[in-house]
Amino acid sequence: MNQSLKLFTAGPVACFPEVLEAMKTQMFSHRSREYQELHMETIELLSWFLETRKTILLFPSSGTGVMEASIRNAVSHGGKVLVTIIGAFGERYAEVVEANGRTAIKLEFKWGEPVDLDRLKEALDLNPDIEAVAVTHNETSTGVLNPLKDIAKIVKKYDKLLFVDAVSSMGAADIKFDEWKIDIVFSSSQKAFGVPPGLAMAALSDEALELSRNMSGKGWYFDLYKYYKVQLEKKSTPSTPPIPQIIGLNVILKKIRDMGKYNWLDMYRRRSERIRDGVREIGLRLFAKEGFESPTITTIYSPEGVDGSIIYEEMRKRGFELAKGYGRIKKITFRIGNMGDIKDEDIDEMLKNLREVIEELKSR
Amino acid sequence: MNQSLKLFTAGPVACFPEVLEAMKTQMFSHRSREYQELHMETIELLSWFLETRKTILLFPSSGTGVMEASIRNAVSHGGKVLVTIIGAFGERYAEVVEANGRTAIKLEFKWGEPVDLDRLKEALDLNPDIEAVAVTHNETSTGVLNPLKDIAKIVKKYDKLLFVDAVSSMGAADIKFDEWKIDIVFSSSQKAFGVPPGLAMAALSDEALELSRNMSGKGWYFDLYKYYKVQLEKKSTPSTPPIPQIIGLNVILKKIRDMGKYNWLDMYRRRSERIRDGVREIGLRLFAKEGFESPTITTIYSPEGVDGSIIYEEMRKRGFELAKGYGRIKKITFRIGNMGDIKDEDIDEMLKNLREVIEELKSR
């Protein structure tokens, strides 16, 4: 493998050295005391980070696994979910709703824009029988961060469940689980936490947990109530957890605690600004609506007539792995992630190369 | 964590040093060429190992995830599955069947014994409408290896689907997927392959794949046909895979290839024999019926009046992590695993300590 590439990916991202070092820890049983301590300490650190006293769970899956769990555990069979769609991962949420025998009411917004609060209210007025609202906190395809706090306020005024896909935001954008009254929020290890993939984590409200308890046909693997009970009784997971990734997450959460939560989040904000400033200076246009730019990923229009994947390929030749466009804007965009172990000098070096690539491509 | 314990666990097991070293590889995107190469090479190695030209898939989950997938993708809603139960993991298969809205016809055998072939035929005669038979290849709770080849012959004579939980056998007991006409076999990384947990792998017959293609309500996360299609088109998985574990599995499969498949399997057979011989010499009784002993785990009756967990605790004090009894025989047994990075000297040292512990406990 070409290990010399500098990663500006959408995830998996470059992991912090202390995480990679921890990944090679010799294994131990997930029923041993050593595991129980690791598990509960990691849960506590996540509780602190998400500002919650509710239930936190760890899953041997990617984030999409918990997306599926939210539907199967907390929405009645055939029940309606209002899925807000601002890009490809909102579309995935709708697919997951339908694949699990529930009904997705799609509320689509122009790609590049966040959820419009008035249209959200309108949809909630029009569909009084919806049970839950699904929101992509940070849309990895468009590089847009949704105003989650404002969205949550509306959803809760209508007394609906709120499910949040925070796969590419948790660890980079603030989430106050209890204060915002979220019902299920989930993420995965390989994004803003800078840990290898294989682990998902979620926070659950009491109501979501109670719904799971009484849900039929929810399956075994993503039975949220079972996860809760096993954690309570055995300080572990129902089936074997991805121990190395949990060790890695534990290392990172302690790093964040030492640095201070808001200093850590600020690091991501500054990195993404540095990238946006640089990209604008090159003369490229950002895809995200101003004021709603993601702190973890920047989606950029490729110059007129240039396929975004060519920029990706040219940058690879120069040692930088960016991310191609995703979904329906695959051809007209490319993306620059800033999650994980990235230094300001790497960003500057990447931008310098990007300028040269763009100039070359324009002069062809 | 106490890293000095010698592991004789039921899994996660002690990983081989070259695997642990590989675990700290810096990450890369699961949509990159580097990942595609790793993915397809690992699939090819697994195909070779399982002697199959059918579909091999990798999952970001534990083995139980694929157990759930077998039911949701290849059994009709409400359809019947004959679940053979020779211990706790057979019971789990039945739970998974029921949790997914299918009907489990339980065929239970005395714990410690394998599936009785005559009773299997009888059950198949009595239940002509069953769609599939579920078998635990190696029952981790009782230390029994089922005669899979013979079972498969019968199941196929009755023209039923055959699902095999090979979580604690794949990598240690032979599986000839095509020749034995298995429909779905699955395992996970943290057992006989000696890789950390977080990755599951499966082989699928064409019929299982076709059933998945046409199945409704199968969900998104474990949609086997989707995995197949994405692998064909993108040489990757639908959602982010546990890359470090895949790197680890790749390393081990190459080690097995270099050593020769049957030499590798023989290593496990010899190790488990060494443990059984030693345990008998101490005067302890084995739980598994003679001739059906597992090549990966030995379940042992604790001496009359001694709780098996005390032996576990005493051995821990001496630096050996065995496994406690599991399920309904938790108190009257303890277990010694021999998967992963274990040397003959370690086995002898462990047995010497076990003898002392047993003598001490008996003289109390």
Image (cartoon, coloured by chain):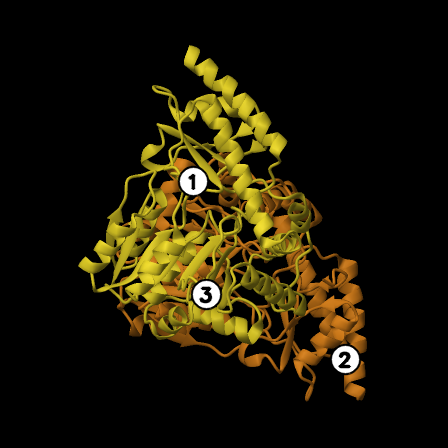
Chain colours: A orange, B yellow
User: Would you say the residues marked 2 and 3 are in contact, meaning their CB atoms lie under 8 Å apart?
Assistant: no
Residue B25 percent across, percent down from the top left: 69, 53
Q: Secondary structure at mark 1?
A: loop
Is disc 1 on the same chain as disc 3? Answer: yes
Q: Which mark is residue A26?
A: none
Per the image, the residue denoted by label 3 is B178
Real-space Cα distance between discs 2 and 3? 52 Å
Number of other residues with Cα within 10 Å of mark 1, as a class: few under 14, some 14 to 19, many 20 or more: many
Residue A199 percent across, percent down from the top left: 52, 52
Is disc 3 on the same chain as disc 2? Answer: no
User: Would you say the residues marked 1 and 2 are in contact, meaning their CB atoms lie under 8 Å apart?
Assistant: no
Q: Is residue A264 in sight in this rendering?
A: yes
Q: Which mark is residue A358?
A: 2
Depth check: give the residue in front, A114 or A345.
A345
Per the image, the residue denoted by label 1 is B293
Quarter of the image where one finds residue B6:
top right
Q: Which numbered mark, 2 or 3, is in the foreground of this view?
A: 3
Going by the numbered disc 1, the residue's amino acid type is: Glu
Going by the numbered disc 3, the residue's amino acid type is: Asp
Disc 2 is attached to a residue of which chain? A
